[in-house]
Image (spheres, rainbow, N blue to C red):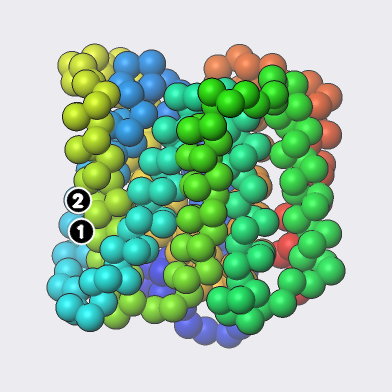
Amino acid sequence: MTVAGEAGGPPGAQRALGVLALLVTALGWGLGWVSTKIVLQVWPPLFARGTAGIIAALLLALVAWQRRESLKVPREAIPRLLVAAFTNVFAWMGFSALCLKWLNIGQGALLVFTMPIWATLLAWPVQGTRPTLKGFAALALGLVGVTILVSGNDLSLSGGQLPGIACAVGAALLFALGAVLNRRPIPVPPVALIAWQVGLGCIPMVAIGLLFEHPHIAALDGPAFWAMAYMVILPMAVCYLTWFAALKRLPPGSASTAMLLVPLTGTMSAALFLGEPLGLREMLAMAFVLGGVVLALRK
């Protein structure tokens, strides 16, 4: 049995698998905006995402056990595992949720999805991957699309929103750093490695949530319960498997640029499931983002 995180076979086939994994990730995380919005009606952000992540980590650990993967982490790999859990899970999921305490969704999305810029720039000194003209063009197209997408929201920023700006930019910068560094292998089997990252990244979220957010546990019922189940299975479990699978098969700049599909998918799914506006602006944004993604993923 193989999983998305294991690479092998002809380069063309591996690239195709990487693109497929990337699309699954973008779709799952994009739809996660809808499920998160539903859950946040009854639970606060850090506690909600942290709880979903811990449950997902336990499910991933069960899958690893069924695959006879060892959950043991070599002592010398523990520091790198902790850094990966911080950048890939705590910073990305935690900071991007926390920024919404000070920013609206349009402001948060615009700042968080500057992530491809940081990934492209960080890949140069860390990996020696010099940005190409095609890469910059793809990034520009995608960012124009995201800007158009959120242009109908109030994008003015005040001094009182500085904590939210710091959280959003921090999420983008740290996740981009994780996208670059994660191409260096950690000597732990693939599913077990992701279980550790998700679990270690989400435990602090739940702890902070219990201390400062004071959630009402029993409030999770009805649609919020099913939205929470989706958060556990797709964004926090399957999508992390497919994200790391994509990073093994595609350059970090291309993979990160394709993640501009996430806010686009989130907007379209919000229109479909929650009745939020969908008009010419959203369609134009789709054209720019898809153009940038296609350009980034071409050989």
Q: Amino acid at mark 1?
A: Ala
Q: Quadrant of residue 111?
A: top right
Q: Is residue 78 left or right of residue 94?
A: left
Q: Is residue 281 left or right of residue 264?
A: right
> Crowding near pointer 2: few (<14 within 10 Å), some, many (20+)?
some
Residue at left offset 54%, top offset 59%: 176
Residue 189 versus residue 47 in the image, above or below: below
Residue 191 pos. (x, y %): 30, 65
Give the CA separation, mark 1 to mark 2.
5 Å
Residue 179 versus residue 272 in the image, above or below: below
The answer to whether residue 255 is visible is no
Q: Amino acid at mark 2?
A: Leu
The C terminus sits in image quarter: bottom right
Closest to the observer, 88 or 68: 88
Q: Quadrant of residue 223?
A: top left
The N terminus sits in image quarter: bottom left
The kind of secondary structure element at disc 2 is helix
Residue 216 pos. (x, y %): 21, 17
The answer to whether residue 248 is visible is yes
The tag on residue 192 is: none
Residue 39 versus residue 81 in the image, above or below: above
Q: Is residue 237 left or right of residue 22?
A: left
Residue 20 pos. (x, y %): 58, 60
Residue 260 versus residue 196 in the image, above or below: above
Closest to the observer, 114 or 254: 114
Residue at left offset 47%, top offset 71%: 181
Residue reaching furthest to the front: 159
Residue at left offset 44%, top offset 51%: 239
Q: How many marks?
A: 2
The tag on residue 58 is: 2
Which residue position is annotated with label 1? 61
